[in-house]
Image: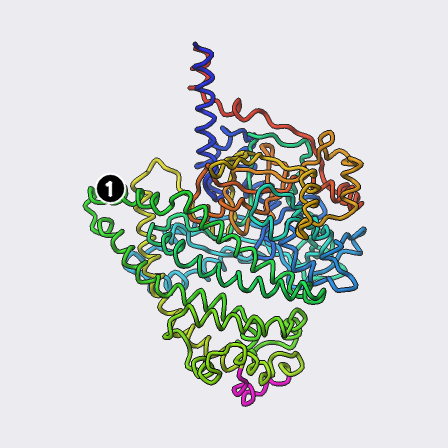
Amino acid sequence: MLKYRLLFLLIFFKTSFHAMGEEGMWLPQLLKQLNEQDMQSLGMKMSAEDIYSVNKSSLKDAIVSFNGGCTGEIISNEGLLLTNHHCGYGQIQSHSSVENDYLTDGFWAMSKDEELANENLFVTFIIRIEDVTDQMLAGLDALEGKALEDSISARMPSVKEKAVEGTHYEALIKPFFYGNKYYMFVTEKYEDVRLVGAPPSSIGKFGGDTDNWVWPRHTGDFSIFRVYSGPDGKPAKYSEDNIPLKPRHFLPVNIAGINEGDFSMVFGFPGRTQEYLTSYAVEALVDSINPARINIREEKLAIMKAEMDQSDKVRIQYASKYARVANYWKKWIGENRGLKISEAVKVKRVEEKAFQKWADKQGNEDYKNLLTNLEKANNGLTPYEVPLQYMREAIFGIEAFRLSLGLDAKSDASIAKFFKDYNRPTDQMMMKAMLKTFDENVADEYKPEEFQKLKSKFKGDYGKLTDYLFEKSKLTTEKEALAIKSNPKKLDKDPVYTLANAFYGLFKNSIVPEIEQRRIEIDQLQKLYVKGLIEMSPEKKFYPDANSTMRVSYGLIDGNEPEDGVKYTFQTTLEGIIRKNESGNPDFAMPEKLRKLYDEKDYGEYGIGDKMPVCFLASNHTTGGNSGSPIIDANGNLIGLNFDRTWQSTMSDVMYNAEICRNIGVDIRYILFIVDKFAGATHLIEEMNIVKERPMIPLEASKTAEQEALIEE
């Protein structure tokens, strides 16, 4: 009987810890007080200070914000940097041409001299994080709304200047919990970052749109760069005199492999989440906002794909644009699916009912009427959301319109760069489709008079309207655009320029102010709501929404069953690539050399017998911006590279569900296998610190003194 009791208790405790450790994007400087014990209960062997420290080197010193939108990590003492293929895609594309098609064929620098410089690419390290709430809010209790925002903004420069005085560092201050807290990030920015290696897209983008946000996954989504410093070790602009960065810390690379149930941690710069939205906001997202975005992007993708399929030149020009549009198109579909499966609106309403019950007992009028006020404010915002999305996604998705806005202030170089990746017929087709979809889905009050006149002139024929604009405009060829940009009289008569600015004027003057006014009101109410939630549950640990600042999330290597009849195992292998390739889908094309390595089972030390691991699932809470984040084991070693979530998991930007949400990583063994066996870039492997460490069983590591006593009994 005791045997079964112990088994039940062990399963119970493992499940409890499993649920505790998955949700949240935690500030690294607060891990000691909030998360260290929980993380160690899941199997982590490090201390919180090993992860974040100001006084000694720590994991945070190997983590960078990559170009402001992704994450990267340093993996050698010579500044070698690993991030996703899709994060480096723009740089790979910029070096590609029909003659040197690095997107298709891949690129590998076999020496430092062959590494490629990248204009405007930068990485940012975090030096320290400070709580500056008192400096930002002291004496401002009587202010609210825009007056409060303006007062806080006025204080920021002096606080930042004092923090970095006498250094080459920069500082950034951001609000957390809707402005209940403020933290300052002191940073170090490096601007000489060179491309070292990238697999062909048939590896780095294997699965394409078919597999995006999908499991099982087999994408080798990685690229390699190198960070350079000046000869003095400090940041410097590109120069041949620069030297490889000597980092404060770099991640050892663990090729011992993973097992289901192993501790895992993601360290990076997640972009944006909205975990504390009310049911009213979630309902608008699911029923109005996401459907509008999805429909527009579906049309745009179909147009681009048809054009790209007909021309290699257009394929290269629009590869990065297509990937950007497709990424969130599919994400929003999955987000809606996950929120509906999880009945997110109902769950939020249950939470709100509990809050209202608590608020009624407090006798605080602000809390008592808070949810009613939030409902009114959100209902006032929703009518403006659809025209906002159609303006942003459809109208300003027309490239000629985007070029027109602020044209006179654009440099010749930026205009030349625009036309390098511009195809006039593609944009002409896009304009025709986008004007039509905008007109059919947006109320007349949000349509500029100039558009209405043109529509009337051509009797609602969007094709003829578009042909007229392209025939008469000087903004669809580089030579004419450069000639006209400094001639205001001619520019003001250009039909594309005129229409684009008419749309922008209405957008700026009629839509944006209404949106901003209502969002300020909602944010003010949300600030109070989050404050109330924290007061209501003082025993609960709260994490702030992601806002592109450094965060840690943690959980386990773990498969799941996200829907009825659907079961995801935690690991995929190279065999899955072979099977997908046999389908004939062009998204599953693979290099012959990779097939040869599979046939010969030539995996080196990276395989397991006749299997070559490729990707895996974990229960770490991630979002956009975590692309390129390291997946780290219990000892602080690199075991994988985060690059995606399962389709249903995209709901975690709004509501995390431990049963559904999983992040997807490339196994570090597959990355090294491609670098070594496929590319022959063994010199890069030699730079790294390769280790073979297996963690302890997480369950054993998680036993508390109370559990030990039960077991002894």
What residue is drawn where x is 63% and y is 52%? Answer: 208
What residue is drawn where x is 52% and y is 80%? Answer: 465
| Colour basis | rainbow
Q: Is residue 12 at least partly visible in the picture?
A: yes
Q: Residue furthest bottom?
A: 489
Q: Position of residue 146 (x, y in %)?
A: 34, 64
What residue is drawn where x is 46% and y is 82%? Answer: 459
Q: Position of residue 643 (x, y in %)?
A: 59, 47
Q: Position of residue 395 (x, y in %)?
A: 49, 71
What residue is drawn where x is 54% and y is 50%? Answer: 269
Identify residue for label 1: 358
Secondary structure mostly seen in magenta is helix
Q: Amino acid at mark 1?
A: Trp
Asked whether, in this view, residue 359 is left or right of residue 640, the answer is left
Q: Quadrant of residue 148?
A: bottom left
Asked whether, in this view, residue 691 is left or right of residue 663, the answer is right
Q: Is residue 245 at least partly visible in the picture?
A: no
- Count of all numbered marks drawn on residues in the image: 1
Segment tinted magenta in the rendering: 483-495
Residue 174 shown in magenta: no
Q: From the viewer's perspective, is residue 651 above or below residue 473?
A: above
Tag 1, which secondary structure?
helix
> Circle 1: is it few (<14), some (14-19), or many (20+) Cα within 10 Å?
some
Q: From the viewer's perspective, is residue 610 above or below residue 185?
A: above
Q: Nearer the viewer, residue 407 or 656?
A: 656
